Image (cartoon, rainbow, N blue to C red):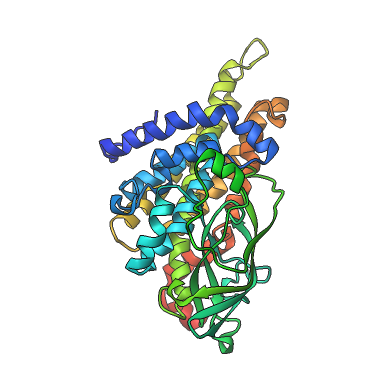
């Protein structure tokens, strides 16, 4: 049991609820969902009912009213068992919903957030493009103003929930003279039907038939991924999408600034997910090495195993405090860009190391689907890529450290 003395009783209770749910409902189905690359609508519905899909949002917007650190703990605990469920909550909350909460008008919040915070529909964030990954300022999707609406044309790739979701925040260039820079990019709210209308109707979640949909927005083929296989990832196509001006999110031309703030939140989420993965891998190793016999005794008695477990546990504790510190700063309205980047960088690289070590400690069994460590290893790698690569995190941290020096020399 994790004992963090500075957490509140309520935060400890949130951990117990999230852990119990993950063990009881997710663990029995995680392997099959991963193998079939099947989106887990039944458990997503349960997560909505528990308040996980709107954990940090106000009750008046149909959120759970938890503090931000409680949300971080939910993401961590789900990833301990299955990263696909964890990223479903994290991407929906920090990428799909937080931009509307943080930058939306009161009318936009009332119109979209209750659907998202309650988990009745899923949300996503359309930023990455074929030619704009780490170079997010190189957005080529264009938005042309025409009377009372904009016409958006472009493509967003690797978008979590692009197929299953119905509400998205996307970026497009409204000033063609500012090509290849962050200036002149605006955020928009667009909507579409989920690709799983029949399934969602049967399950009772995921589709809002009364929500007006944006003409010209559609999802492409589902990506066949190495990890996070039960999470939906696709291209989101904007084919002369007609977006009313009331769906402009924030000030025109401020999309670049706003999505950088959104990515700071997303990095805390991926840090928490990576932390949970590493902890889950350690839990599996402790159990396996205590049971596995070689040379007439449990392999947990070997010094080499001691060293591996000790290193994993020490780094996990370091990652936990980095992630929780970033969450605490965010919760208390303090600057957290550097802390979020550090948490994401350290925790994601740790998750890769820890899960590879977990497979090694399981020996040949670790290379089979009989044990979850092989799935954990596959799930861990994308943590070093999504929400900004490790290289981007190092740039962010260095710029925060150097301040004006970068502006002068870079």
Is residue 116 at least partly visible in the picture?
A: yes
Name which residue lies at 38% across and 68% down: 103
Query: Residue lying furthest top in this view?
Result: 296
Examine the image and state in which quarter residue 129 appears. bottom right
Query: What x and y, as percent, mark residue 161?
Result: 57, 53
Query: Residue lying furthest bottom in this view?
Result: 177
Name which residue lies at 32% across and 35% down: 12
Up-down relation of residue 97 to residue 313 (above or below): below
Examine the image and state in which quarter residue 202 appears. top right
Query: What x and y, as percent, mark residue 94?
Result: 45, 56
Of residues 132 and 93, the one drawn nearer to the viewer in this rendering: 93
- Left or right, 22 with reference to 34: left
Examine the image and state in which quarter residue 180 appears. bottom right
Of residues 348 and 58, the one drawn nearer to the viewer in this rendering: 58
Is residue 336 at least partly visible in the picture?
A: no
Query: What x and y, as percent, mark residue 156?
Result: 63, 66
Of residues 410 and 188, the one drawn nearer to the viewer in this rendering: 188
Total of numbered circles in the picture? Answer: 0
Name which residue lies at 47% across and 68% down: 260
Name which residue lies at 43% across and 74% down: 246
- Left or right, 121 with reference to 356: left
Query: What x and y, as percent, mark residue 62?
Result: 34, 50
Quarter that holds the N terminus: top left
């Amino acid at each position: 049991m994790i004992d963090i003395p500075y957490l509140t009783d309520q935060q400890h209770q949130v951990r117990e609820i999230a852990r119990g749910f993950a063990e009881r409902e997710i663990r029995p189905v995680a392997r099959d969902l991963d193998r079939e690359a099947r989106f887990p609508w039944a458990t997503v519905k349960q997560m909505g009912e528990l308040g996980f899909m709107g954990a940090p949002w106000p009750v008046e917007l149909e959120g759970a009213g938890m503090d931000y650190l409680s949300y971080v703990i939910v993401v961590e605990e789900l990833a301990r068992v299955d990263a696909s469920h964890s990223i479903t909550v994290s991407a929906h909350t920090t990428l799909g919903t937080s931009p509307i909460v943080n930058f939306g008008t009161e009318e936009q919040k009332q119109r979209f957030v209750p659907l998202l915070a309650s988990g009745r529909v899923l949300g996503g964030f359309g930023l990455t493009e074929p030619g704009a990954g780490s170079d997010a300022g190189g957005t080529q999707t264009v938005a042309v103003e025409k009377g009372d609406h904009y016409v958006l044309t472009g493509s967003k790739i690797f978008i979590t929930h692009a197929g299953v979701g119905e509400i998205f925040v996307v970026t497009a260039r409204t000033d063609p003279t500012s090509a290849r820079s962050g200036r002149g990019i605006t955020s928009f709210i667009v909507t579409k039907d989920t690709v799983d209308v029949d399934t969602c109707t049967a399950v009772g979640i995921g589709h809002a038939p009364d929500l007006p949909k944006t003409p010209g927005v559609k999802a492409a083929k589902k990506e066949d991924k190495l990890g996070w296989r039960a999470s939906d990832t696709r291209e989101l196509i904007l084919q002369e999408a007609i977006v009313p001006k009331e769906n402009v999110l924030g000030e025109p031309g401020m999309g670049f600034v706003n999505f950088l703030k959104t990515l700071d939140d997303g990095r805390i989420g991926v840090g928490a997910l990576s932390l949970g993965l590493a902890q889950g891998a350690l839990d599996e190793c402790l159990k396996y090495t205590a049971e596995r016999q070689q040379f007439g005794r449990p392999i947990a008695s070997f010094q080499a195993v001691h060293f591996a477990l000790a290193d994993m546990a020490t780094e996990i504790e370091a990652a936990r405090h980095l992630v929780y510190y970033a969450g605490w700063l965010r919760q208390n309205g303090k600057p957290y860009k550097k802390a979020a980047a550090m948490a994401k960088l350290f925790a994601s690289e740790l998750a890769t190391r820890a899960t590879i070590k977990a497979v090694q400690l399981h020996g040949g069994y670790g290379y089979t689907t009989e044990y979850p460590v092989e799935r954990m290893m596959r799930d861990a790698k994308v943590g070093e890529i999504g929400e900004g690569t490790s290289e981007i995190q190092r740039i962010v941290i260095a710029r925060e450290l150097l301040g004006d020096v970068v502006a002068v020399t870079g």
